[in-house]
Image (cartoon, grey):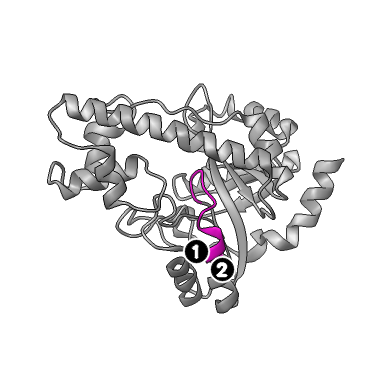
Amino acid sequence: MIDLHVHTTASDGQYTPTEIIEKAKEKKLKAIAITDHDTVAGLEEGQIAADRCGITFIRGVELNINATKGEFHLLGLGLKAISPSFQLILENLIKNRDIRNRQIISKMNGDGVDISIEDLYHDFPNTVIGRPHFAAELVKRNIVKTRQQAFDRFLAKGRAWYCERIGSNLDEAIVAITESGGVPVIAHPMSLYLSWGKLPEMIEKIHEQGIAGLEAYHPGARVSECERLEGLGRKLGMFITAGSDFHGEKVRADRKLGHTCGGRKIDDKYYFEELLPNIKKATQQ
């Protein structure tokens, strides 16, 4: 088994990079990619742990991209050295997250919830603060019973405390990932919330812009949708990936390391290192 989409405490995951690698070893994963939201802070620790455990480590990231509808997340897989353009994107994304976090806090304060940004930094140190941390804080304060309830009642789009977040420009993100030695892969494309009448055209367009890979297999989609995405991606000549989007049992109990849609094990036919030379060759044609 392998897993090409995993989160740690560097963003909104439950486990540290070392703990994630140790769990991967327990489950006998051959390769794993740490892809934290808008940060590469956990990669060095992950690399050290993977080397010690004898697991192939794929240095990755998951970037938030500006989109007119739904959510557009872009994976960067196989990062070598972080380029200046990539570092600038990460810095801007963190600044935009901080602006959004303070807007959410303002709405919460307006509704009588006594919380500050300092409270979040204290309770969740050394991480990229986002809505999952707000959800955890609401559980801690007994305002809601579960993190999912926090989203359903307050934090999801259209709810009282939701605030839009500014992402990165797609073209700039593609350049930054490729300049850093990585391959751009669109994550869980069903989250774009496009119909099947529009989705193929959208994926073809972003492939022409430079996105080489498509995460066809994700636990948030039905098996039939994932198989259809794989067919579409292969027709376009895209690299197909699969991931668990694992955050930890306390965060998302329905997601398991090394497994994707329908509880399927992620087969090593999606093994990144073996396919990387072909991707680079394809993107240069």
Can you give x and y, in whole percent of width and height, for residue 96 in the image?
45, 31
- Of helix, strand and loop, which mostly describes the magenta segment? loop
Q: Is residue 99 magenta?
A: no
Q: Amino acid at mark 1?
A: Gly
For the view shown, which residue lies furthest in the right direction? 285
Q: Which residue is mark 1?
A: 258
User: Which label is found at residue 229?
Assistant: none
**Residue 3 visible to the viewer:** no
Q: Nearer the viewer, residue 156 or 124?
A: 124
Q: Do tag 2 and tag 1 residues touch (Cβ < 8 Å)?
A: yes
The residue wearing badge 2 is 1
The amino acid pointed to by label 2 is Met
Task: Name the residue located 58 percent from the left edge and 66 percent from the top edge.
Answer: 47
Instruction: Relative to 28, say whether 174 is above or below.
Output: above
Figure check: 209 above or below 90: above
Residue at coordinates 68% horizontally, 37% vertically from top-left?
174
Element at badge 2? Answer: loop
Within 10 Å of disc 1 (Cα), the crowding (few <14, some 14-19, many 20+) is: many
10 horizontally vs 104: left or right:
right
Q: Which x, y percent locates residue 151?
A: 27, 37
Could you tell me if residue 128 is visible in this image?
Answer: yes
- The residue under the point 49% across, 69% down is 21
- Earlier sequence position, callout 2 versus callout 1: 2
For label 1, the SS is loop
